[in-house]
Image (tube, coloured by chain):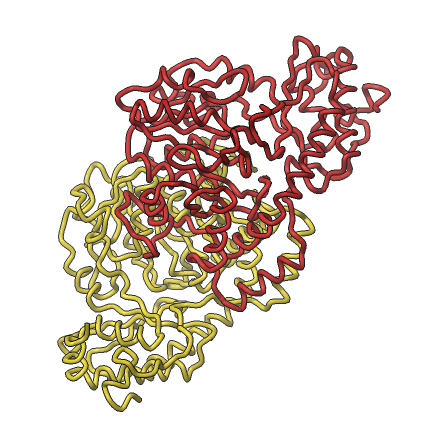
Chain colours: A red, B yellow
């Protein structure tokens, strides 16, 4: 506990952590299993173009998700671009403003016009109610986002899309292994895009995947994924180099084996955060609907300044100075960011919920390298910052 | 030597090679140097987002090329997309039809309209003469391709682009380490896009890079390359996940060290092909302008059926059956391929030279795993096929 305000690193005190705690440092498989897999790649001298390990990952991830098809690609953004290009060749796609900018920009790369919508204040995600007002004759699809591992209203959105005759895609980058009423993410809408980035619970260092239960869509996705004639070749609007390498696939396969233990470790840290943060005025940890299954990869706080007496941004500054690398996702909201902030075709409405969340959300680190004691230390710092709200605010406003 | 026509594998004889000889199997660094580099990545637990090895490769590749900036990215297609997006936000870009489809499709992903042009019959590349007729008030740029390691008329194209006030990009995916009048590829036009794919002389397993001498363009490229705020952030039309991973960069750095020996080995195999193919009627090996410096990564034949007495496609079939994986690049020409074959905005003219090359070009394998004896065996097969042209043709037309 920092006894005095000047003990905080932001004001010149010693940093709580010597090395930075990153938001979600990669879950590493054992080194021996990695060198063994890489040795095989070297012996085959086959690195790219859908080698045997990528094919195995395609099969194993489909099995894990329970979908008919999994099409592994370079990264999550490319997954979204390929899915959008395969499903909707023109027109408007409705997408939340409260998301990582890649969700929206992938639509632009695919030649579509993103139309931003607001989100529900409870779930922080889109609902039929936040989307419906934006549907016009130009709408070709919806791109919903499963945020923080939560499934985004999949059944009601499927009904809406079917009623309106438009396509439904999900950005499932956060939601590897998650489920809604025992139906696993990866089986909703027309198709779902995943990320296997280093910050994800299942990681290929970098990587991505598209899942679908639609055989024809799967053929299109595989055709778009590379310029090489593959097992499937169907007419496609455009193709791209979206190939996953053997090295990425080898890491992701090992990571998939580790999924249960990584999820269990995430849950232990989540519980430690929940206990550690209990009772801090104005600070609440995002909790999850009991009908859903979460991967607990995301530790997200909601900070209500009117109760905590101190703004999220001050927590952010002070924690960062302690080497706790936190994130103000998704500040300032895609509708306030270039290139969309001035595009009337994309920003057609107001975004009160997104604006509010962008002022209050704070994502904290959780990773394989962190102990439960680290989590307790972070929670104590947060408790301490809130308890010293007034002197900290006075001092911050004096700071250069 | 196959004594009888039925000795060719295509007609049921034994394959000349037990395992397939691929077109350009990856040049591998020593396994120990790779595990050592990868061990460092594991210890840092830092895989993505411009880590220390990517930064080093950016610096080292710029030094190698002699350009002010090198911006390493996921792959060659993404390099072209980012370069095109940074240089030309709308309008038409003139590009050869005689190229790998990625060159053209990258422009479409970047929201531009590719306008295809024909190539010069001697160099197989664009010239001011093949481009100029397509320049209109809608033209925003030229994307020229350095084919088979040859520099594509860089100085005359620079004059043309400057005169017309349009941008000039190069697809330099074939031309790592090549030069024109002692000026290295990577320094021409506004910017150049490279590939570090497994089939390239310098390989990261997969990878790509953009080089430029324009400081402002470099900032734009770095901004577009990822969604993360980096060292530079300037207004950009769109951003993408174009990040190279630490693993890719580690392999590419080791491959860069090996460049001189890989080039020397390529040259030895090229010379072996030249000797082995000498005097075969109608079969000529592409030779290079003595004022240029080539990496000899591409063994490309021109097969003149009127002299050889046998079409390129029959050589292709027979060699493939012998496990010699050759390529009919770039058959049938981008103007004859979807999605462009029916697009009037893109296919505005006729392409007699491209059409002819697409019927005659045959790329043969060359790689680290091949011995000079392998090359001699391939040359003998080619000599043999030409010598037995008539009985082979008769038998092929009977084949199922």
Q: Quadrant of residue B311?
A: bottom left
Q: Farthest front residue?
A: A182
* Left or right: where B281 falls relative to B189: left
Assign the N terminus of chain A to one quadrant of the image.
top right
Quarter assignment of residue B387: bottom left
Residue extending furthest toward the right = A3
User: How far across and how far down the image is residue A255, in percent?
Assistant: 60, 48
Q: Quadrant of residue B179?
A: bottom left
Q: How many numbered circles does the render carry?
A: 0
Spot occupied by residue A324 in the image (x, y as percentages of width and height): 71, 32
Q: Nearer the viewer, residue A67 or B337?
A: A67
Q: Is residue B136 left or right of residue A215?
A: left
Q: Residue furthest top?
A: A306
In the image: residue B67, left or right of residue B92:
right
**Which of A98/A393 is in front?**
A98
Image quarter in which the C terminus of chain A is found: top right
- Residue located 63% across and 19% down the image: A302
The correct choice, above or below, for A38 with respect to A105 in the image is below
Q: Is residue B69 visible?
A: no
Give the x, y percent position of residue A179: 53, 33
- Residue A386 appears left or right of A33: right
Residue B157 seen from this side: yes
Foreground pick, A268 / B201: A268
Residue B252: x and y in percent read 53, 58
Residue at x 61% of width, y 31% of height:
A298
Position of residue B394 relative to residue A385, above or below, is below
Q: Residue at x 48, y 19 (%)?
A: A119
The residue lying at 34 percent from left, 53 percent from top is: A227
């Amino acid at each position: 506990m920092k006894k005095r305000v000047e003990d905080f690193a932001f004001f010149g005190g010693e940093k709580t952590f010597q090395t930075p705690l990153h938001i979600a440092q990669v879950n590493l498989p054992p080194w021996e299993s990695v060198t063994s897999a890489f040795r095989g790649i070297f012996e085959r001298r086959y690195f790219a173009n859908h080698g045997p390990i990528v094919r195995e990952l395609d099969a194993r991830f489909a099995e894990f998700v329970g979908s008919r098809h999994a099409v592994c690609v370079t990264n999550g953004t490319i997954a979204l671009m390929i899915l959008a290009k395969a499903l909707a060749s023109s027109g408007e796609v409705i997408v939340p403003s409260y998301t990582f900018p890649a969700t929206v920009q992938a639509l632009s790369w695919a030649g579509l016009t993103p139309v931003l919508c607001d989100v529900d204040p409870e779930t922080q995600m889109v609902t039929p109610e936040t989307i419906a007002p934006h549907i016009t004759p130009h709408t070709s699809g919806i791109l919903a986002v499963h945020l923080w591992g939560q499934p985004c209203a999949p059944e009601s959105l499927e009904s809406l899309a079917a009623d309106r005759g438009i396509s439904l895609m999900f950005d499932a980058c956060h939601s590897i292994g998650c489920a809604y009423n025992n139906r696993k993410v990866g089986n909703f809408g027309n198709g779902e895009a995943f990320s296997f980035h280093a910050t994800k619970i299942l990681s290929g260092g970098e990587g991505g995947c598209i899942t679908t239960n639609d055989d024809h869509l799967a053929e299109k996705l595989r055709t778009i994924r590379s310029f090489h004639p593959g097992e499937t070749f169907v007419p496609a609007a455009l193709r791209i180099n979206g190939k996953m390498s053997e090295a990425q696939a080898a890491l992701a396969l090992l990571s998939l084996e580790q999924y249960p233990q990584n999820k269990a470790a995430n849950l232990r840290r989540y519980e430690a955060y929940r206990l550690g943060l209990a009772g801090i005025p104005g600070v609440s940890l995002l909790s999850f609907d009991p009908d859903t299954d979460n991967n607990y990869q995301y530790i997200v706080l909601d900070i209500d300044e009117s109760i905590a007496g101190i703004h999220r941004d001050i927590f952010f500054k002070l924690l960062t100075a302690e080497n706790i690398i936190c994130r103000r996702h998704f500040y300032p909201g895609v509708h306030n960011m270039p290139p969309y902030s001035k595009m009337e075709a994309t920003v057609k409405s107001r975004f009160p919920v997104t604006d509010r969340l962008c002022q209050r959300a704070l994502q904290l680190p959780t990773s394989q390298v962190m102990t439960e004691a680290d989590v307790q230390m972070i929670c104590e710092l947060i408790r301490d910052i809130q308890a010293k709200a007034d002197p900290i605010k006075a001092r911050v406003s004096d700071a250069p």
